[in-house]
Amino acid sequence: MAMPVLPQDFASPPWTVDEVLALNEASATTRFECVDGELLVTPAPSIGHQFVAGRLYRVLAGYLDAQRIGYPLFAPLDVRLTDDSLMQPDLLVVPLRDGMGPRTAHRIDRLLLAVEILSPRSRRGDRVLKRNLHQRVGTPEYWVVDPILRVVERWRPGDSRPEIINGVFEWHLEGATEPLRLDVAALLAD
């Protein structure tokens, strides 16, 4: 499928969620998101990006299967944390509803964790726009994974700077009986 034709002033905000949904329906390889009305355009992820996403998903899924507190999902999947934002985090954890993962009819509007894996074209959107939105709405954890520098930037609501992690760290999800121990070096190893 070809990339949809964008208006001449496509970079000028504000974009609506409905406009971005229409763009996503017209494109199989380009991801369109909007944060506070600003359009973000990201090409299809690289093989390296997908490798890291797959590794991290397996770790999260194993942990959450044992803890039964949240449900892991991955992009492309629409998340609406505010009325004027539509995002597709690379990986996300949603809270369970009545002990079950989300269903087709559920709007995803609350996250326990959002993860973005940096690529050259996503740095500003991931590190600034999306992070600001996640902090503003109270997403408990927002991770920016940098495969080049081999670090995870860990953000929580209220943080003015990220925790930069290149070793092992723990994520203790509220209600879990034990924390997830994530080895960043192993995750980002070639």
Image (spheres, rainbow, N blue to C red):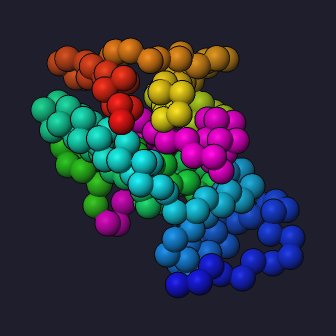
Res 83 visible: no
Q: Residue at coordinates 29% horizontally, 54% vertically from top-left?
A: 102
Residue 67 on image: x %, y %: 17, 30
Q: Is residue 125 above or below residue 152?
A: below
At a point 58% along the width and 19% down the height, the residue shown is 162
- Which residues are the magenta region? 104-131
Q: Where is residue 149 in the image (x, y as percent from the top left)?
A: 54, 27
Looking at the image, residue 165 lies above or below residue 20? above
Q: In which quarter of the image is residue 61?
A: top left
In the figure, residue 104 lies in which quadrant?
bottom left
Q: In which quarter of the image is the C terminus?
A: top left
Residue 167: give x, y in percent of width and height: 38, 15
Which residue is at a point 70% across and 65% down the rendered structure image?
A: 16
Judge whether residue 121 is colored magenta. Answer: yes
Left or right, 2 with reference to 78: right
Residue 112's spot in the image, x, y percent? Answer: 40, 35
In the picture shown, does residue 39 fall above or below 64? below
